[in-house]
Structure formats: structure tokens, C-alpha cells
Image (spheres, grey):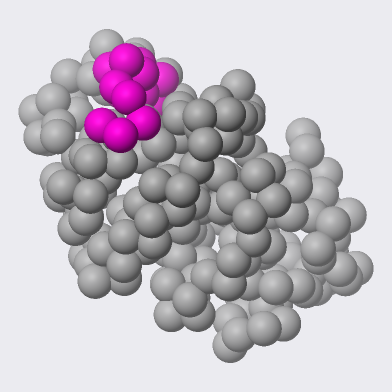
Amino acid sequence: MELAAAERRDLADLLGTLTAEQWNAPSLCEGWTVRDVVAHLISYEELGYPGIAGTLVRAGFRPGRMNELRSEAYRDRTATQLVGILQAHERPRGFTAAFGGAIGLTDCVIHHQDIRRPLVLPRAVPEERLVEALGFSLRAPVLPSKKNVAGIRAVATDLDWQHGDGPEVTGPGEALLMALAGRADALSELAGPGLPMLADRVTA
């Protein structure tokens, strides 16, 4: 939970520096701008479990459609308002607080990079947060990480983390996290005999 709060603080600090043009720039999430990603990130914070269940029914039990519905509810908010909501919910609540805050942490680390990468604003993700996010990404039901890494040994070259068996894919932990989560943008930073297999899955 503390790691998630720290990650959200860092993201809020970044968002406070972005121009209007950057807020409307494309993110790594297909069809979503930076503003859309932020709206998605905070869209579950003010929704209790009954509200989540109702939204899931409205979405036809499709997680992707559920995310669209929640994001749409925040698309009329200004950038200042979105940052304010993020700051007010520094510690994850409700759904994103599940698994000790691991949902909130992993979601924020990935979406933070979804914003930074296309804006060419690199950073070093704190190691402790990255290790936790890598581990949980393999258990998160809405992420493709577990399926993408099946039959592959993923090895981080800059921290103590590895997973699986099979042909290796090596690279920085952040790039591994992003690639396993389905971001093709990170594939060029990876190497190893298992990379063609991973790239086929990510780009499919």
C-alpha cells in the first residue's frame, strides 16, 4: 500500500508539469490520450463494490468495456481536477486496494510508463515497486502477462527478478513489465532466444 501511494505521488508530480498538448497526446494505450489514461486510473477510486458489480453487468462482463464506461465518467474533468482526485486518493481504496494495494501499485506503475514512454520522459522506477509490480502482474486477471510469459524465462538485467522456464528473454525490469503487459513499445529493449515468441504474442 505504501509503495502504491508513493507511485501515485510521483505520477501526480509528473502530471502537474505537463502542458495541455501533452495531456492530449497519445499514450501507449491504443486509442487513449494521456488524459484518458489518468481518467481510467482514478475511475475506480470513488466506486464501491456494489458500483463495480453494477458496472460489470452494464459492460456485459467485459473488462475492456468496463474500463471504457468508468473512464467516460471522468472525461469531462479538467486536468487540474483529475490530478486533484489522484492526490485525494493517494492510498488506493476499494477495488484498487485489493491484495494489499498491489492492484493500485501495478496499475499505476504500468500506466505511469504508458504516459512517460510516448512523451519521451524516461525515469528509473524504484526497484522495490518494480519487483512487486512484476510479480503481481503475473497474477492480475486483467493483464496478459501470465499468458505472454508462458514457456519463457524472463530475466531482469538490472534487478533481482526472474520468472519461468524456457528460452530466455532478458532486459531491464521496466521493459519486461511493459512488454509482458502487452506494450510492444518495450520489445526493442529486450533480447534473448525467447524474444521472437514474446514479440509474436504481444503484437498479435
Residue 50, placed above or below residue 91: above
In the image as oriented, which residue stretches furthest toward the bottom?
160
Q: Main secondary structure of the magenta part?
A: helix
Q: Position of residue 33 (x, y in %)?
A: 55, 27
Residue at 77% in and 34% down: 204
Front in this rendered view, residue 37 or 196: 37
Q: Which residues are magenta?
A: 67-81
Q: Is residue 170 left or right of residue 15?
A: right
Residue at 30% in and 34% down: 80
* Image quarter (top left, top right, bottom left or bottom right) of the N terminus: bottom left
Q: Is residue 43 magenta?
A: no
Q: Position of residue 133 (x, y in %)?
A: 45, 65
Q: Is residue 167 left or right of residue 88?
A: right
**From this viewpoint, is residue 18 visible?**
yes
Front in this rendered view, residue 27 or 81: 81
Residue at 62% in and 79% down: 162
Residue 116, placed above or below residue 54: below
Q: Is residue 146 left or right of residue 132?
A: right
Q: Position of residue 42 (x, y in %)?
A: 29, 38
**From this viewpoint, is residue 139 visible?**
no
Residue at 14% in and 34% down: 46
Q: How many marks?
A: 0
Q: Position of residue 174 (x, y in %)?
A: 62, 66
Front in this rendered view, residue 185 or 50: 185
The image quadrant of residue 62 is top left
